[in-house]
Amino acid sequence: MDQFDATKMFDLFDKFDLPARARQLIVEGFNRPARWTEPTPVKAPAGLCCPKMGIVINTADALEKKAAFSYLFDKNVMGYLDSPFQLHVEYRGKSDKKVQQNFAQGFLVITPVGFFWDEWMSFGRQIASCKSNPYKFTRDGDVVRCPPREEAAQALGIKYRLRSERDLNEVSIRNFEYLRSYLVDEVVVPPWFRSELREYFELNGYSTLHELREAFPSRSKDDFYAAIADGIITTDLSMEFVREEHTFLVFSDQATLESYQLARPLAFASPRRDWSEWRFRTGQKLYLSGNPFTIISAGSLELTLQAADGVDCVRLKTRQVLNDLRAGTILLADEQTEEADPLYLESEWRYASEKERENALRKIELLERWEAGERTKEVQEYSDRSYRTWRKIKADSQINGTDLVADFLPKWSLKGNRSVRIDLRVQKAMEDIIKKNYDKVIGRGKWSVFGDLCRELEKEGLSVSKQTFLKFIVKTRSFERDVRREGRKAAYQTKPFYWTLDRETPVHGDFPMQMAHIDHTPLEVKVISSDMGVPLAQPILTLIMCAFSRRVLGFYLSLISARYISCLAAVLDMIKRYGKVPVGLIFDGGSEFGGLDFGNMCRHLRIDQQSRPASACRYGSLLERGFEVLQDDLIHQLIGNTKIYENYRQITPENDPKKTARFTLPQLHAALEEYFFEIYDTRSHGTLLTSPRAKFELELDRTGKRLHRTRTIDSCIPMAFPSVRGQTRTIDCQRGIRTNYGCYRNPRLEHPQFHGLKVPVRYHPVNPKIVYAFVKNEWFPMHFMGQHFDLLDSGFKNIVGLEERLALQLPHRSSRHQSNMEASALIEKFNESATSEFDEMNVDALQEHNEPSYSEEGRVSEKEGGRSIEDEMAMLAQGGFLGTRHEQ
């Protein structure tokens, strides 16, 4: 695989003389933010690691994802970019109104023959677009075009192409996905292995992959897969699935492959022994004396064949062609498009019941007795004419070599009048009334709508029975009707279930850890603090499961709502246990999966991000089922389980899970670990018919160990670790960095020059005693200096210990808030009391300051001008307060 080279792209600018505006838009497209569309009920966006471009390519749906796979392996594609820039489109719409839009969907594809703007849309949507917007889309036979976008692209020197799934080969896409991880991780094929392959193909023009592997028994499957993915071994990935080693062909060079492709129709044409007239149809190819002919007219008596040059035509008897096919002098091409539909039984016995088979055997027996001259009452049940007809059938069967019993089948199932006997006007009225009144969100009942139908039919003098109407509703029920009556989410349960993504592609992948599901669920059990014994919040389980083997890969327990830290910790737990990462992670539309740290981790580990369609739980059904099994088998059997919350009125102080809880988070973690990796992992799975562990290990040997997906915790430090809230922290040269309600220190940073610096900080979700600070272009490990973790002796206890601390901070903050309110009230109370007393003290001091001074004779000083004591006592006596001090 050749890496994208910008220099070659600039050379193509000059070669095709692209306008300056186009060059500017293309160059700016590489600097635009990556596209990430929100999941919808019909679309699931994905982020794919692209080794050819060195970036992440974002796709909007499954069809664009397949297109991205094809671009990666296409040697003629030098580079490609999703949603490169906005293409300004103008066209005349309804009523000749001018319509303008900025179009940015699709891929910019750079090839040696030019620049292309590829928009991928299913063929069904293309046809629907032609009907809904004929001013923009036009149809010419089976080709759909968009002239306005073609003109807009042509103005920039780019060619616009509207493409569909018919431009892709499903076998190729399956092979691309199977081999892509070898390119993503840049697996290098050793030089000596290249030499061994050259020596082998000097003696062999082509062989099967199985024969090639047997020639080099010391080489692993990964070596051969890496050579195929990198193009060192020449092959056609559209012919066979690479795992089918006995039929998957490899070639010495491209010329040998092309020669084989030219001769392939003859190689696959073979004589048959069961030909019948109905197998011939217009467009079918025959090989007569090695020359290709096409059937342009197929009749029961004659066939008209046209030569490959399109000039000469040959007429042959149908029976003669059948005889030549049996003899092998005429070969019939077996094309993939001519294969029988596997959903139908292509046999004479397709409609035969057991009674029909017994009837055919009895007829044959009676015919033999009639031919022997027997004329008993049983034989004379049928006339001699019938026996002569049967004798003719028997003779033809012997000549044609067909099944005698099948030729005598009575075909009772085809008898009878199967035409619609209901009046077409009544049927049309039922369709209209159902569409008008029944298929509405108001949800009217069948009887109510039947009344509307009867009133409509009475106007035309027609009628219909209620049984016919009710049967018609049941017969015409569909997912679309349920959507119109109950809404999209309610109708999801009646949506057709897709067992496979494509006809030939398994829904859960082809090898272990090709796809892994990650999701969260609250466990229905109450836990208590291991230190203080107080009840804690309901634990949240984050689980990762291999889609192919159903094996649990990693998990994480949290006491806080699902967050991005739980996702990263579960992935790191998987790396710690298995030392490998999956090719892709499938998740729902939760906000925690759209976080910056989660995306950085996936890019660092080269994991594709695959979102599930919105409100489509079936895409994660195996994980949802795993949650249900876990709750039923383990969680609901533990002390303090919350099953009784389903019947909330039955809760009493004796059975309240908050009072009966006995499990701590470390104990629950240990129970889950033993259940996942000792019990569930070794138990036979109903779908696999073996244990997840056995399936996982067996398929690793069959499909390659893929050691290039190996990762270690050390290789993740610190780029795959979560950032602290706010991403930065301030360094205190004496206390270090404060985060997670604790201080982390490193003696190398205890210097005044680092004091007050704001630095990015990430913490270790598997070992919470360490965080990493990026200071002066270096990541410094900072160690926790408190005592909380010192008594915990294992990794998972440290993890749950941190979760307990974070969970206990919630009531701590609530208690602190309450105490702050009480303290505020107390402060206000004492402030008012102190102020009042202070004011009173000031009044007394003022009165004391204004008190008149007396001379030695007890008289008031003339200077102050006050009253004498005698005058004061007289005034008090007149006021009626004798012997008492009156405070004014």
Image (cartoon, rainbow, N blue to C red):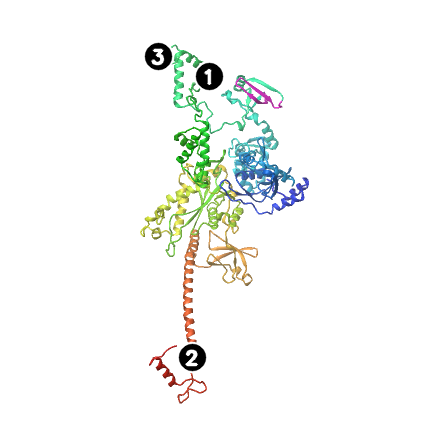
Furthest-front residue in view?
A: 459
Q: Residue 397 bears which disc, if any?
A: 1
Which three-letter amino acid code belongs to the residue tagged 3?
Answer: Lys
Screen quadrant of the C terminus: bottom left
Q: Mark number for residue 377?
A: 3
In primary-sequence order, the first of circles 2 and 1 is 1
Q: Does residue 377 appear in this view?
A: yes
- At numbered mark 1, what does the secondary structure look like: helix, strand or loop? helix
Q: Amino acid at mark 1?
A: Ser
Extreme-top residue of the structure = 373
Answer whether residue 230 is visible to the viewer in this image: no
Query: Left or right: 623 with respect to 323?
Result: left
Residue 824: x percent and y percent?
42, 64
Q: Name the residue carrying label 2.
A: 847
- Residues at circles 2 and 3 in contact by the CB criterion of under 8 Å: no
Mark 2: few/some/many CA within 10 Å (<14, 14-19, 20+) = few
Magenta region: 289-310
